[in-house]
Amino acid sequence: MHLSDLWFIAIAVLWAGYFVLEGFDFGVGILLPFLGRDDTTRRVMINTIGPVWDGNEVWLLTAGGATFAAFPAWYAAMFSAFYLPLLLVLVALIIRGVAFEYRGKRDNSNWKRGWDAAIFAGSLLPAILWGVAFGNVLRGIPLDAAHNFTGNFFTFLNPYALVGGLATLTLFTLHGALFLALKTTSDLRRRAHRAATAIAAIAVAAGCGFLAWTEASHRAAGWSGTGIASVACAALAAVALIVAALANRAGREGAAFAANATAIAAATAALFTALYPNVLPSTVSAAYSLTTANAASAAKTLMVMTVVAIIFLPLVLAYQAWTYWVFRKRVTGPAAAPAPKGH
Amino acid sequence: MNVLDLSRWQFGITTVYHFLFVPITIGLGFLVAGFETAWLRTGHDRWLRLTKFYGKLFLINFALGVVTGIVQEFQFGMNWSAYSRLVGNIFGAPLAIEALLAFFLESTFLGLWIFGWDRLPPKVHNACIWIAATGTLLSAYFILTANAWMQHPVGYTYNPKTHQDDLSSFAAVLFNPAQLAGFPHVIAGCFLTAGSLVAGVALWHLMRGRAAAPAAADAADVADGADGANGAATDAADAADGGGQVTAFRSALKAGAITAIAAAVVVVATGDIQGKLFTTRYQPMKMAAAEALYHTSQPAPFSLFTIGSLNGSHAIFSLDIPRILSFLATGNFSAQVQGIDNLQQQYAQIYGPGSYIPIIPVTYWSFRAMIGAGMLAALIALVALWATRRGRVPTSRVLLAGAIALPFLPLIGNTFGWIMTEMGRQPWIVYGQMKTAAGVSANSAGEVLTSLIVFTLLYGALAVIEAGLMLKYIKAGLPSEPEPGAAAEDQPLELVY
């Protein structure tokens, strides 16, 4: 296996990690106006993700940095082609990130409502746009011989990519609802559970539909080893998604969240294996497509990056896991009477 | 304006803005960590209250530093894709490593610090902010490595087959001499910035408190001398001076001012090393422009003040000190320093026809603004320290103005430092290899104009909100209840199994 293939896998893993982790904090943000009826409830919801959302977002920055270093031509073509969608993502991530930190800094209900709106919009937009973007990457975009994008914003708004957007939106919202059911108590926990039940049906339809469409369009070109792997990942994702829906119905909160996390990771794997060996196909001519071979950095850079990743990725995983352990308890609103600590 | 100009404006605006928050974050992280450690060591409430007070200011800044940093990583690909294609092998690696080594560390451990007051043992809690602060330092190292490579590219070979720069030595990139000189300069600038913020705010509170309650302040001053030796006296005085604000801010002033002054010494020393390195070896044109030295001179005078022609092509009036530039640039009073016109001729021969001269007034004046603002900050910190010696509380209106100016001056210095070094490198994006005009993406001007407007408006609005919050929390003074615990709005309320 070439180092460039290893880095293709590494980038797939980083995106899977990003979607699994930030997926639920996007979901919590999207559900904020629907489940957060009063300020206390909204605070509880935000506090379930407060200590971890920023660390979750670093998975995206690492994926971006890794793409830049390992596949400069991919990074350059993709980021300049998706210029306006990425601008929207950036604006969303900016207002959302600031909102988490600034919301509680003034005791003023208009101030808080404004930031709540920012959290909602800042979570909703990327949850849709990442799916649309991935749909377009898989479908291919008009790239010329110099790998420059020749389309415009409306090129991205094709039915397949929009189904992709619906899939990520519903999967992440479900993920957030399952996370809230797992991390809160009493009334909020019950309502999160009901929300998960309601969204699950749409998420199963949109998620499975998008994966089926992906596999069908890629298998039309014939079968390959990675093609089989992609179908297997897609099947695993579909099964895990259905298991998540069923476990939620049965009130098995931990199992439901774990199954949905598996579904998101497997779906990401299915998309990347379907894409391989392309990294950004051109709809103008297959000769203009960017592949793991023609977009990759030279061996020396990939080797340096590999050594750094082998040493530090386990460390990152260990301390991120520790944070989740420290904040493993459920979050709840203040009791009617001032309750003693540590019950 | 064309795509190139729009992209350059966007990069300039977003980067300068980002770097308003970064130095505060880097320096203040360590100072707040130090305050918390002082609290754990001495057990005195004032350190905890300072931790909370400056910790809040730190977090307000950190939030904007983080979110504007995402833009930085994305816009190389969005706006500078031709550049990204050429240099990804080398420039991309530090960016990826920065995310993996530094961003995870900062975000994770800061999350633990904000929300972990009640859930972590005190020493572990304190360790979290030390680790987060170390993360900001690591982050700075890697991103400055990338910048140093643009200033002085090393450790690569151009591959004509792929039209990319291939990495030949990662150690050469990591330990680029331009980086080894530049990194301590920037980091010392960060500590000058944070020290000035801490000291300026503390001095303002001291002087304001004095005006409000001189008697109470005096009582606290008496106790300050006996601090630690007589806990009861200190507590009594704390009650008298409005809950110990005076004693606490006196400690903060000392810590901030000493940090700022020490940092300023390092800034000057490393700036001198950098200046010599760039004048004599790496970018003589930038330094000649910074001095508005048009003709190669031996010995070269140092220009105190120059008025250039409108197009910056020659000097009309110049006030010089003989031989000083020769000394500053080389350590030798009679050495030759190359001038702009001569360098232009040389470069046209090496790189082909075209102008290799940066915008001289910008380079010249930003160089002086950087030095002036930084040195003025250090001077105010020094005066503040002197004026508050042995329990004195100054009443001078000039010093009060100085206290208010102090936190802003290093921000001005940092900004002009970057403007000088980045605009002084023009027309190059990678010095000697790629011109900025060749690095830009093939996007439409409309797209880039859209993002330029969006970022400018969004950043402007956020600046107003940020400044409002900073002022609110600075004015509020120290928290009255010095109990360890997460701030009310960060309290995850109640936790149950």
Image (spheres, helix red, strand yellow):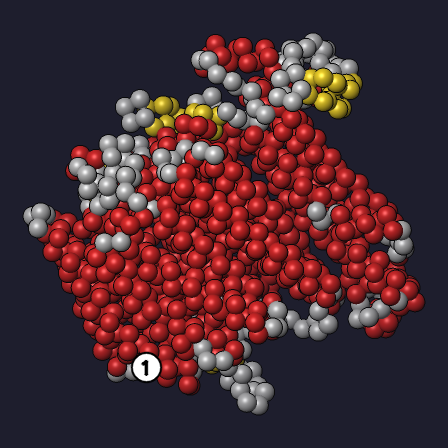
Asked if residue A94 is positioned above or below residue B327 in the image, the reply reads: below
Q: Is residue B278 visible?
A: no
Residue occupying image coordinates x 31% and y 22%: B160
Q: Position of residue A332 (x, y in %)?
A: 48, 80
Q: Is residue A340 visible?
A: yes
Residue occupying image coordinates x 75% and y 19%: B318
In which image quadrant can residue A266 be found? bottom left
Query: Disc count in the image?
Result: 1
**Left-right relation of B489 to A210:** right
Q: Nearer the viewer, residue A68 or A283?
A: A283
Q: Nearer the viewer, residue B151 or A318?
A: B151
Q: Residue furthest bottom?
A: A337
Q: Position of residue B115 (x, y in %)?
A: 54, 68
Q: Position of residue A197 (x, y in %)?
A: 28, 79
Looking at the rendered structure, the kind of residue marked 1 is: Arg
**Left-right relation of B166 to B250:** left
Asked if residue B286 is positioned above or below residue A307 in the image, the reply reads: above
Asked if residue A3 is positioned above or below residue A341 in the image, the reply reads: above
Task: Please state, as top left, top right, bottom left or bottom right, where the N terminus of chain A lies in the image.
Answer: top left
Residue occupying image coordinates x 48% and y 50%: B454
The kind of secondary structure element at disc 1 is helix
Residue occupying image coordinates x 53% and y 51%: B457
- Crowding around mark 1 (Cα neighbors within 10 Å: few <14, some 14 to 19, many 20+) is some
**Left-right relation of B158 to A291:** right
Q: Position of residue A268 (x, y in %)?
A: 25, 57
List the residue tagged with mark 1: A194
Q: Nearer the viewer, residue B148 or A203?
A: A203
**Left-right relation of A69 to B418:** left
Specify the subunit that label 1 lies on: A
